[in-house]
Image (cartoon, rainbow, N blue to C red):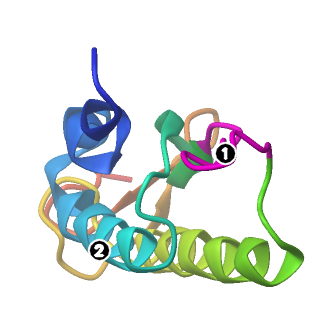
Amino acid sequence: MTNAADRQIPGYLNYVGPGWRDILMRAHAQLVAVLPNYQVAQVKEKWGMLDVHLSVYTDPVTGGLGISRELGSRVSAILNAARDESRRTCEVCGEPGSETGREWIRTLCPDHAPPR
């Protein structure tokens, strides 16, 4: 990944199951609306839900690090909403799902969950 746009969510869609891609793209649209130059540090599945981490923000005009507390709260709300939605969404197909597994927790619909 070489430019800033490559370090945003669309560049990380293949890091999780296809069922969560719509959730990620909604989060991306919301993030761009409040923090256009955000950059991703990591996107993964952890404990059966989306886990998105952003890089430290550097203001492109001033070069200053970080964001205001209010903006940080808005960004956190976007990422938390995506995480919460992923906990109810099959990571394979995007249909309603629930947590499955013991050692490796995944969120799956009845069609994709392993037999019990």
From the top left corner, tell me how far across and down residue 11 is, in percent: 23, 36
Answer with the quarter of the image where residue 98 lies. bottom left
Q: Which residues are magenta?
A: 54-65
- In the picture as drawn, the residue positioned furthest to the right comes out as 69
Q: Is residue 53 above or below residue 98?
A: above
Residue 83 magenta-highlighted = no
Provide the secondary structure element on which disc 2 rests.
helix
* Residue at 63% from the left image edge and 33% from the top image edge: 103
Q: Nearer the viewer, mark 1 or mark 2?
A: 1
* Residue at 55% from the left image edge and 49% from the top image edge: 52
Answer with the quarter of the image where residue 75 lies. bottom right
* Main secondary structure along the magenta-highlighted residues: loop
Q: Amino acid at mark 2?
A: Ala
Distance CA(mark 1)–CA(mark 2): 17 Å
Q: Amino acid at mark 1?
A: Tyr
- Nearest the camera: 47 or 10? 10
From the top left corner, tell me how far across and down residue 20 is, in percent: 27, 60
Q: Which residue is mark 2?
A: 29
* Residue at 28% from the left image edge and 65% from the top image edge: 90
Q: Which residue is mark 1?
A: 57
The reply to whether residue 94 is in sight is yes
- Nearest the camera: 12 or 63? 63
